[in-house]
Amino acid sequence: MAALIIICWRRRSRNKRPLLPRSPSELEFEYDAFVIFSSQDSDWVIKTLIPTLEEKHDFKCCVHYRDFVIGVPLRENMVNSVYNSRKTIAVVSKNFFNSNYCGSEMDYALHRLVERRDNSVVVIKLDDVDSRKLPRELRKRSYIDYPQNVEKDHWERKLVSCLTTSNDL
């Protein structure tokens, strides 16, 4: 069974770019994003996604093994990560759908999306997985299609834009 690696990030205090004005409801979040991905996709996440966000755009990563509260059940840590983040980023792949943990994380994120109607889920399709495997709530939403050459050239701009825009629908 594939293990799950979870990463969240928040802005560093020495932010190079000015923070966008935030609504009072957005101030309640501890993190900008919570990232869900299969451990089998960790190479791309660790070598591409994280350096892009941390080094280039000055986001600070919150890694589950470093930042989850010791002694708190894993499920509770996961739910808290979804609800304490403005966005949840799902790095979707064939591996993603073969992981029980990714499915649980996605369920928590979708529950929040439906409950709060806050446009909080961002999908990055990492490989040629059939988009019909996406949950019904996400099929008609735009996503970043990384395997497409055109998308590869623009994925970073699209993701940063998603992270810096309001959650309101």
Image (tube, rainbow, N blue to C red):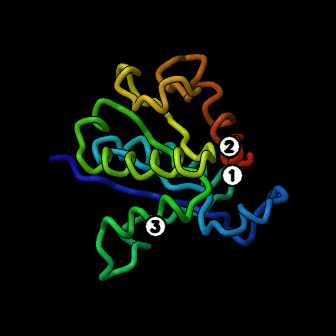
Query: Is 90 on the left-hand or right-hand side of 87?
Result: left
Three-letter code, disc 2: Val
Q: Is residue 166 above or below residue 125?
A: below
Viewer-proximal residue, 6 or 141? 141
Q: Quarter of the image for the C terminus: give it.
A: top right
Q: CA distance from mark 1 to mark 3?
A: 25 Å
Residue 160 is tagged as 2
Closer to the observer: label 3 or label 2?
3
Residue 30: x and y in percent read 61, 69
User: Do callouts 1 and 2 mark residues in contact (Cβ within 8 Å)?
Assistant: yes
Residue under numbered circle 3: 80
The image quarter containing residue 10 is bottom right
Three-letter code, disc 1: His
**Dot placed on the residue nearer the N-terminal end, 1 or 2:** 1
Residue under numbered circle 1: 57
**Dot placed on the residue nearer the N-terminal end, 1 or 3:** 1
The image quarter containing residue 97 is top left
